[in-house]
Amino acid sequence: MVPPVHRWIRISLFNLLIVASLGLVLRYKILFPLPFVDQKHLLHGHSHFAFAGWISQAIMTLVVTYLSRQAGGVMFRRYRWLLYANLATAYAMLIAFPIEGYGLYSIIFSTASIFVSYVFAVYVWRDLNKLKEKTPTHLWFKAAVFFNAFSSIGAFALAFMMVNRVVFQNAYLAAEYFYLHFQYNGWFFFGCMGLLNEVLRRVDTDPRLLTQMFWLFGAAAIPAYFLSALWMDLPVWVYILVVVSAIAQVLGWGKMLVQIRRKWPVLKDTLPLTAKWIMGFSAVALSIKLLLQLGSTIPSLSDLAFGFRPIIIGYLHLVLLGMITLFLLSYFFAGEYIKANRKTSFAVFLFAGGVIINEILLMIQGVSAMSYVAVPYINELLFATAFILFSGALLLVSTSSKYFQT
């Protein structure tokens, strides 16, 4: 019988394949006619399903796995209905958004997804409090589920504006970035850091240092929202707070890297080679992301970044693919939820290669856009890269499925 965690990870991987498939279609439509597909509507479906069906489903599964290890196997029975509810709303949005965009049914299903996140947050918070052993990992997970719920303020504001057709550009952007920030810099990031924190805790990292690292990121999380809103006319004190929050996150990650370096002699023997490489790629992406954030506090650089769509798309892909997705895949290998062998390793390295190529191309496109220079065949190259990502995801799903039985 397949253990619950393996079954849910298999589902999450299949959802990643769907995300890659939609990305391939979106890139195809830029080059070739596809009249029955509305590009904007499909993009909404792609992004909502990536958030709910792939990343959220995977993190929810791994958080429940942690609780199950600490409190016993009953946890998957307790959370099963929530995992199914999140999955159902994700697939409902996958269908509704490409058909109608922001319409009645898509808003109903996205609202239902938000309420699932509320209940999940309450369950996790209570179950973490019930555990006898309190660790810094709990702080990361509590912050993660809080920010997941908190991000819904932006989602509700967007839905209100879309339904009532009252859209002011600044208000729309502020709500959109609020939702995105507290999803990828809150729920996704803190969830993944909780998992990484648990890996470090197992090799006897000083709990006080782990707690210090949490508070550096935790205290910076809310003011860091304004890193995405530097185009607004912010008071000087808010700008100073933003700069301090960007520095705090760089310092927090620096402390984390120091601990990883110190514990490396033990860590390298506990992680499969594939996990180490993919986690390394994710760490590089996070380092680049934090440095870009710090650089964006310079007003002239911020104006450039927010003035060109390819830069924004490249940054979002850096976070969601390079940082979060690669970390989750590496964690699957680290926990041996996917067995590392020649086939599965080739599949995940192919996918990681696609992520790296995609990011390089998007950054080239962004820099050239700032110079108003067109890059020859850039869309064809991005389409080819989307095919690499799809192929990697397909191979990973097909080659890993037989190894979930252990």
Image: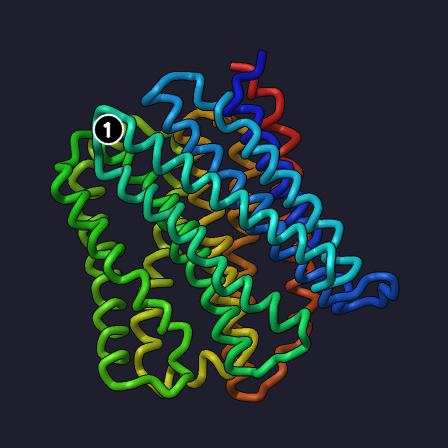
The vertical placement of 403 against 170, above or below, is above
- Viewer can see residue 363: no
Q: Residue furthest right?
A: 35
Residue in front for this viewpoint, 312 or 386: 312
Q: Around disc 1, counting alpha carbons within 10 Å, would you say few (fewer than 14), some (14 to 19), or many (20 or more)?
A: few
Q: Quadrant of the N terminus?
A: top right
Question: How many numbered marks are there?
Answer: 1
Drawn side of residue 198 relative to residue 178, left or right: left
Query: At 14% from the left edge and 44% from the top edge, which residue is drawn?
Result: 209
Q: Which residue is drawn at 57% across and 83% down?
A: 168
Seen as rendered, the residue at the extreme top is 1
Q: In this view, does 255 lie to the left or right of 348?
A: left
The front one of 237 and 19 is 237
| Foreground residue among 166 and 199 | 166
- The residue type indicated by label 1 comes to Arg
Q: Name the residue under label 1.
A: 202
- To which quarter of the image does residue 274 belong? top left
Residue 139 lies, in percent from the top left, at 27, 43
Residue nearer the viewer, 363 or 170: 170
